[in-house]
Structure formats: structure tokens, C-alpha cells
């Protein structure tokens, strides 16, 4: 978590900086606009997510839109299950 500068001083990485998909899953500001398929456990962004919220660009970078039905099953799993 700490990075050491050549001068011997250490700085701490900002907690608001998205660095990976795991970061987006842990941050409640972006987590509420994500959903998971109950069948394949794949994560994706909700189709009704607003266009202007914190982390939207990063969410689109790491996850695609995922539509699930009322049971929480995505389209790919529905075709396999039927």
C-alpha cells in the first residue's frame, strides 16, 4: 500500500483511485450499480445505471452490461437452462 520515493519518504496511494475490477466490487459507490448472475456468478453493470456517477468510466472499462431476469439469471444461462 505504501510506495517509497527515492528520497526515503513514503506516500500512501489514494483510496479513491480505481486500480482494478476488485476495487470496483469493494467500493459501495460503484457496487450498487453492479449485479451478479445467480447461475454463472459473472459480474456486470446494471442496465439502469445512470450515465453520470462516480466510477462510470472505470465500470465500463472492466465490466460489460449484464441483464438478468427476475430470478437473477443472465441471458447466456437462460439459453443453457432451457
Image: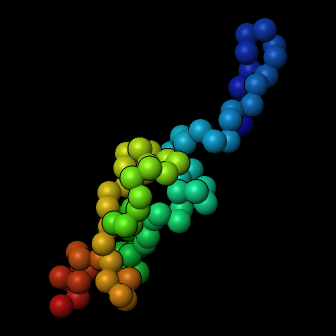
Left or right, 55 with reference to 78: right
Q: How many marks?
A: 0
Residue drawn at 37 percent across, 67 percent down: 48
Query: Which quadrant of the figure has residue 63?
Result: bottom left
Say whether residue 31 is left or right of residue 50: right
Please provide percent x and percent y for residue 75: 23, 76
Drawn side of residue 60 relative to residue 13, left or right: left
Quarter assignment of residue 71: bottom left
Residue 8 seen anywhere in this rendered image of the structure: yes
Image coords of residue 64 (percent x, y): 32, 57
30 is higher (above) or lower (below) than 72: above
Q: Quadrant of the C terminus?
A: bottom left
**Quarter that holds the N terminus:** top right
Q: Residue at x 52, y 48 (%)?
A: 54
The answer to whether residue 1 is left or right of residue 37 is right
Which residue shows up at 41% across the image and 62% down it? 49
Q: Is residue 14 above or below residue 67?
A: above
- For the residue pair 49 and 37, the one nearer the viewer reads as 49
Amino acid at each position: 500500500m505504501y510506495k517509497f520515493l527515492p528520497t526515503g519518504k513514503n506516500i500512501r496511494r489514494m483510496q479513491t483511485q480505481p486500480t482494478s475490477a476488485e476495487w470496483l466490487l469493494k467500493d459501495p459507490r460503484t457496487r450498487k450499480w453492479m449485479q451478479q448472475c445467480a447461475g454463472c456468478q459473472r459480474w456486470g453493470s446494471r442496465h439502469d445505471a445512470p450515465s453520470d456517477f462516480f466510477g462510470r468510466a472505470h465500470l465500463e472499462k472492466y465490466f460489460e452490461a449484464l441483464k438478468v431476469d427476475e430470478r437473477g439469471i443472465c441471458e447466456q444461462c437462460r439459453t443453457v437452462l432451457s
